[in-house]
Amino acid sequence: MSTASKYIFVTGGVTSSLGKGIISSSLGKLLQARGFTVTIQKFDPYINIDPGTLNPYEHGECYVTDDGAETDLDLGHYERFLNTPTTQANNITTGRIYNNVITKERKGEYLGKTVQVVPHITDEIKRNIHLLGETGKYDFVINEIGGSVGDIESLPFLEAVRQVRWELGSNNALVIHLTLIPYLAAAKELKTKPTQHSVKELLSYGIQPDILVCRTEHPLSLEIRKKLALFCNVNLNSVIEAIDAETIYDVPLLMRKEKLDERVLAKLKVVTKQEPELEQWKNFLGKLKNPSEEVNIGLVGKYVSLPDAYKSIAEAFIHAGAQNDCKVRLKWISSEEISKETVESILGGLHGVLVAPGFGERGLEGKIAAIQYVRENKIPFLGICLGMQCAVVEFARNVLELEASSTELSPKTKHPVIDMMEEQKKITTKGGTMRLGSYACKLKKGSKAYAVYGDSIIHERHRHRYEFNNKYLHQIEEAGLKAVGVNPDSDLVEIIELKDHPWFLGVQYHPELRSTVLNPHPLFVGFVDAALKNKKNDYKS
Ligand code: GLN
């Protein structure tokens, strides 16, 4: 295709949480499967510069990219579906836009001018819309506009979309509006009125959607489709049904059936003979839906009542489960419920336990009790970030019998086996002050980690302030907890592994962020395999 990118905008109407991220990712997947290069970017209307400081309870997990950007969890879907990395450029917030404009204003770049939402904020949004397209790397740039049409805070973004569309013309830019068709059980009817209203709202901003994608619990009849087409000024074949799916990974195939990709290509005047190549995707779905085994894995964390807080971990288990022909049943366990007294009744019978990442939390003692239990009972264990740190504290306390802790939780602890690095201590502001993004890690030959990765140098993403304290390295290793992965530049410990245990690994980084449908993460694949072996009693023989 030509080097100029085509721009697809995805807006949302009627309610939030309709799954713009999944629709964008699914469309991206279909275009990619036809041989096109695609990237997806998300515009978030909130004032935070990035979601790094947001409470996961409010906003779900914070997804970290290779370049160390703290981003919206939808970027995780983009990567899991497209299997290509995203960067800071893929996630822009209102806060970042204003920050850029205000920084320019302070530098005198607008000297003499009144700085206004239109044109300065909208121009900055437009500059960001074009950034990835201008690299020349992408045939399509899909832009997901966060929030719903009608929100006050989305207005500058919608004005920018209107302008870009006008400037590029209808052959180069189009708007997909994702909307809800509610079903009224009493009337036994699907209702189009909310969609009509949200399209009218979009029209009042000067945007005519080209395609409607309609979330619905029931199939859309021809009559409903005709009604939507007529009242929303879209072609009948551009009314696309998005019926509730069994799994998000079905959505690309459902969109294919509804010909969403064909409509997009036709509207953007892109001619291609290549049909989407989805064999591998279908293979994955086949395995996902027909597992021959099943394992129960406990996920011990703080935010278990909001599964979105651990989105990437849950998805990584789906990928790794399918790879192992095994359904992974996750049992979400609040660390605050675990104590020495309750641990057996909560964790007994599980085939594996994962202790989740987290920050400065109350549930620490519960995590430590959980780790002691799985260490002593030889249950496969994976500790991620805080989970690994807890494993080190547990080992120092219960094996080395030190009064140990992490200085994050007890600043005055006698034995700070987990501590902040000197350079981190000088930083006082929050946000972007952590070890963030991709770092190299060298694996020790002969370790389980090495066997799992099949490589000696790996790169994984980080998001934390505290580290394994190397002052205790010798003592801890002597007692059997080995540092089997180390950062080659800084000597920071990245992976710990317990000797004389079937599968006990802690990682300072976040493997879940790199797991995709086509590339399930080896650590999760290895962990699920270990849980399966545990289930089959292989470890006890
Ligand atoms: N709170 C710990 C730290 O900052 C761990 C962070 C995490 O689990 N992502 O080092």
Image (tube, rainbow, N blue to C red):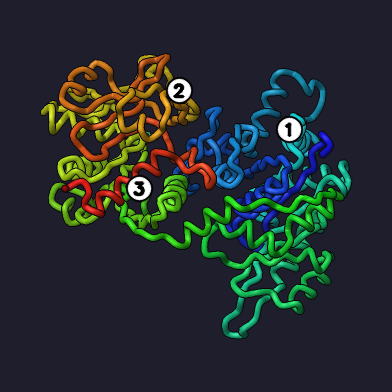
Mark 2: amino acid = Ala
Q: Quadrant of residue 95?
A: top right
Q: Is residue 263 above or below residue 527?
A: below
User: Which mark is first along the chain, 2 or 3?
Assistant: 2
Tell me what residue is drawn at x 67 percent, y 34 percent. Answer: 97
Tell me what residue is drawn at x 13 percent, y 51 percent. Answer: 341
Q: Is residue 301 above or below residue 227?
A: above
Q: Is residue 234 visible?
A: yes
How many other residues sit within 10 Å of disc 1, few (<14), some (14-19) or many (≥20)? some
The mark lying in front, picked from 3 and 2, is 3
Apparent side of residue 29 relative to residue 7 in the rendered image (left or right) = left
Tell me what residue is drawn at x 64 percent, y 37 percent. Answer: 90
Considering the image in quadrants, where does the N terminus appear? top right
Disc marking residue 201: none
Residue located beneath label 1 in the image: 137
User: Which mark is first along the chain, 1 or 2?
Assistant: 1
Apparent side of residue 503 relative to residue 12 in the rendered image (left or right) = left
Q: CA distance from mark 3 to mark 1?
A: 37 Å
Comparing 509 with 59, the one in front is 509
Q: Are marks 3 and 2 in contact (CB under 8 Å)?
A: no
Residue located beneath label 3 in the image: 528
Q: Secondary structure at mark 3?
A: helix
Mark 1: amino acid = Lys
Residue located beneath label 2 in the image: 440
